[in-house]
Amino acid sequence: MLRGSAQADVVIIGGGFTGLSTALHLREAGTDVAIVEAMEPGWGASGRNNGQVIPTLSRPDPDDLIARHGVAGERFVTMLRDSAQNLFDTVRRYGIEAEHEQTGWVQPVHSPGRIRIAERRFKQWSKFGAPVELLSRDQAREMLGSDAWHGGFWNRTGGHINPLALARGLARTVLGLGGRIYARSPVIDFARRGDRWVVRTAQGELSARALVLASNAYSGEFSKALAPDIAHEVMPVLSWQMATQPLSDNVRKTIIPARQAMSDTHGELYFARYDARNRLVTGGAVIGPGNKAERLKARVGERLQRLWPQIGEVRFDYVWNGYVGMTTDYMPRIHRLGPDAYGWTGCNGRAVALTIPLGAELAKAVRGAPANELALPFTEPVTIPAHALLRPFAPLMLLLYRYRDAREIA
């Protein structure tokens, strides 16, 4: 906990994947760095996601990024292309025990017309040298053990990890390299005083030459004064995850037998991966009142039986949730906040792979690298109008996703 006054060369607000990766790369360069975290490392979205390591964004593809950001977009695409490999290389380099499996990531298509999504992604990512392949319906059936999909797209560098184990492993690595982490210290606000940034908590303050804001979807959850412009340019949406009881060896060998991570083209996403104990880790979304966890167990259990009839009765050992920071165009937002200060938000469900190399770029930025050497397409914050009024209604977007999922569109 941060008590009293402290100093660092760089202060990072947020102890999730981005903050931890930034701190790790700064310590590798010998820079004095301190993380100030509201709860514990990985407590937020970094520890509560599905653990899929996906080297793409959720919807935008390379052409979209380059059209929006030009040469900075090209550098970002290159970083994104290598993001999964970067994560797994980091885990192996530091011996982080994160239950990591680099088995690839598959995006099967859920209707014949959606094959255009796979074809577009294959064409665009191939231009940038990504190890991608198109899958026929027969190949998707063999890879996933189900007749539910009509082909797809896959990237061999992807895979999956235990996200909370990764966050804790990164935190131990940062501490082992001499970094500091002040946990249980929600930041009230930060401001520029002279040539220093000052971060205030309830019981202390920390001043630093440079600052990185890495609170993502939780930017407005502990203090409305922290970074309101950034907090209001994303919509925090609750994402539910759940893990089945361990599957028997015979059943497991017929459901995603090579253990790839899978998330398909539904707006109401169908996704799954294995954990180290052969639980199928999946999830879903739900709207309306009532016991959401129990309703999800029934809904997702029925879905799994429909996709994989051989699974039999489905029981869940664990159910958990956390916020995903959604932007209106599914693009991440990366900002200059002032002299030697940077921040980002808008993971749109794709932060696991992205945040590790993103942290490396933010570390370079606060150490003075010029903008034309950074894979960071900077923009100004643009808030969502009537954010507070719209937030309670954000889950209703699920109805629109279900409507679109039933249509033959790309």
Image (tube, rainbow, N blue to C red):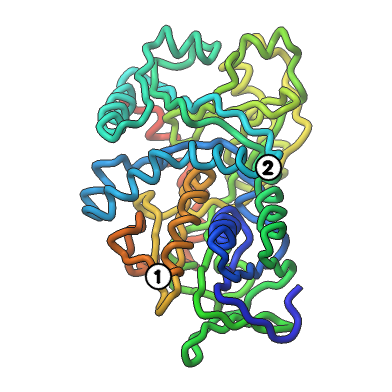
Q: Quadrant of residue 161?
A: top right
Compute the Cα span from label 2 to label 1.
Answer: 29 Å
Residue 235 image point, x, y percent: 48, 58
Residue 308 or 102: which is nearer the viewer?
102
Residue topped by disc 1: 368
Give the x, y percent position of residue 232: 46, 67
Of the residues under marks 2 and 1, which one precedes in the sequence?
2
- Residue located at (26% from left, 28% from top): 123
Can residue 199 be seen by looking at this rendering?
yes
Please, is residue 246 above or below residue 208 in the view? Answer: above
Callout 2: 10 Å neighbours few (<14), some, many (20+)?
A: some
> Is 53 left, or right, of 332 in this rendering?
right
Q: Is residue 203 left or right of residue 357?
A: right
> Farthest residue toward the bottom?
194
Report the residue that reaches farthest toward the front.
Answer: 30
- SS at badge 2: loop
Near-viewer residue (43 or 101): 101
In this picture, is 78 found above or below 5? above
- Residue matched to label 2: 96
Image quarter where the C terminus lies is top left
The amino acid type of the residue labelled 1 equals Gly
